[in-house]
Image: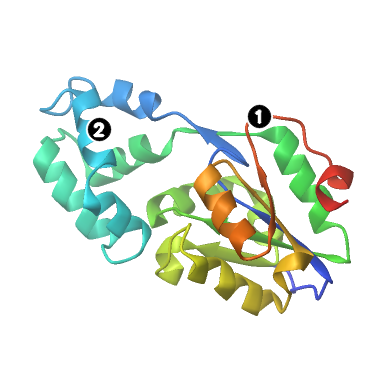
Amino acid sequence: MTQTKTGTAAVIFDLGRVLFDFDWGIAMQRLRGRIRPDPQDFYHLLAEHPDNIALEDGTLTAAEFFKRWLDFAGFNGSVAEFIEIWCNIFQPIEKNLQLLQECVHRPDLQTAFLSNTNPAHIEWLRPRTPIFDQVDHVFLSFEQGLRKPDPAFYQRLLKTMQLGAGQCVFIDDLAANCQAARKLGIRSIQYTGQDLSLEQILY
């Protein structure tokens, strides 16, 4: 991470579907014939299971998570191979990464990530995303023990940045996360694929 700036404003980015799109269908297709359940049934079961949230809030380690679910699925390969399939689902949203780059190079702006995510995905994304280590603050749910839309997650980041809510702009794809930020006074933009410019988000 670069030396933290002391800018008088901040732009806060979500990761998934703001900076990186993802498609679970890619992973499920690669798992077809390699696990006992039908991959779509497996995905829906896991997506709705408390273990998924526990992995994101850090109460379940990645090692525990993958052992539990590989045993359940009967995957006919190694843990490392499963994790590669699990993580190789991302595509960069280049226009928004360029926007982030513009923010990073503004000396008057702090930049931050505020993301509900898990250690496996971050370990996969970080070395493939040089700008990851150029932002000023990286707030990840599994490291902080908090998930959006919990107000405490946003408040902890504001305290770290030493900024008021009104000095920040937050970009997220989920309405509930944006609404939670707005209740704290953070100006929020729900990203649904539209073009965003630095001028638009700051003024």
Q: Nearer the viewer, residue 190 or 1?
A: 190
Residue 4's x, y, as percent?
Answer: 74, 74
Q: Which residue is mark 2?
A: 44
In the picture, residue 18 is in which quadrant?
A: top right
Q: Position of residue 177 (x, y in %)?
A: 53, 51
**Please, is residue 101 above or below residue 111 in the view?**
above
* Residue appearing at x 35%, y 29% in the figure: 27
For label 1, the residue is 193
Relative to 83, is 133 on the left or the right? right
In the image shown, does 191 or 181 lie closer to the viewer? Answer: 181
Query: As shown in the figure, which amino acid type bears the numbered disc 1?
Result: Gly
- What is the x, y in percent for residue 50? 23, 52
Residue located 71% across and 60% down the image: 134
User: In the shown orientation, is residue 98 left or right of residue 49?
Assistant: right
Please identify the quarter of the rendering in which residue 156 is found. bottom right
Q: Secondary structure at mark 1?
A: loop
Left-right relation of 122 to 27:
right
Percent of width and height locating residue 86: 35, 38
